Image (cartoon, helix red, strand yellow):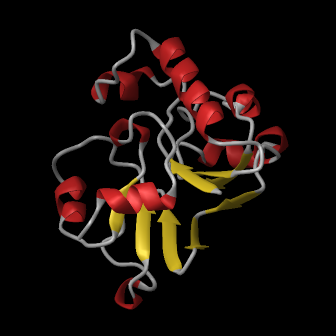
Amino acid sequence: MNYYTSDLHFECQEIFDRTNRPFKDLDEMKDVIIRNINETVSPNDTLYILGDIACADYDPTIELKEMNCAKVLIKGNHDARWMHHRHFRHQFEEIHSIKAVRENDTKIVLCHYPLAEWDGYWKGYWHFYGHIHNSTEGASLIMSKIKRTVNVGVDVNEFKPKTAAELMNIRKD
């Protein structure tokens, strides 16, 4: 089974503060996110992380090793620095900037960034994205008006990975 999440932002105080994450500190947040992943995603499942695993200056390899599942990275803006490091890249089965996946009879375009239109939009494909956290303005307002789009960020999904069916159920357009 496939699961989806984004914007974990390990060791990122600025994001922690700006998004009002409900934890006492970064260590508690990290522990809860990793526990939620390991309680939800089995070793035979795949976790698609749609970017921003940590702050650009923090190497999240230790946290990635604690996740007991296969991982696919859809690169976010905070991940670029680590693409040059083999130990980081080897934590993933695949790494992409954008990727289309199939869940049963549904195609889903995965990208860290919210897209107003994507390849397959007119064919009924879905779009999963992150990047905008729990914002209620700007891109968030735009995306709320576009059918078949879902923000998979931890900030809006109880800090837990979700299946495609769970995420699509959020948006019953």
Number of on-image labels? 0
Q: Position of residue 28 (x, y in %)?
A: 50, 13
Residue at position x 77%, y 43% from top? 43
Res 74 visible:
no
Res 159 visible:
yes
Q: Position of residue 155 (x, y in %)?
A: 36, 37
Residue at position x 51%, y 54% from top? 163
Question: In which quarter of the view is residue 141 placed?
Answer: bottom left
Residue at position x 66%, y 30% from top? 60
Residue 73 vs 120, above or below: the answer is above
Residue found at the very far top of the displayed protein: 24
Residue at position x 17%, y 45% from top? 136
Question: In which quarter of the view is residue 99 placed?
Answer: bottom right
Q: Position of residue 142 (x, y in %)?
A: 19, 63
Q: Quadrant of the N terminus?
A: bottom right
Q: Quadrant of the C terminus?
A: bottom left
Residue 100 vs 13, above or below: the answer is below
Residue found at the very far bottom of the displayed protein: 123
Q: Position of residue 114 (x, y in %)?
A: 36, 62
Question: In which quarter of the view is residue 54 placed?
Answer: top right
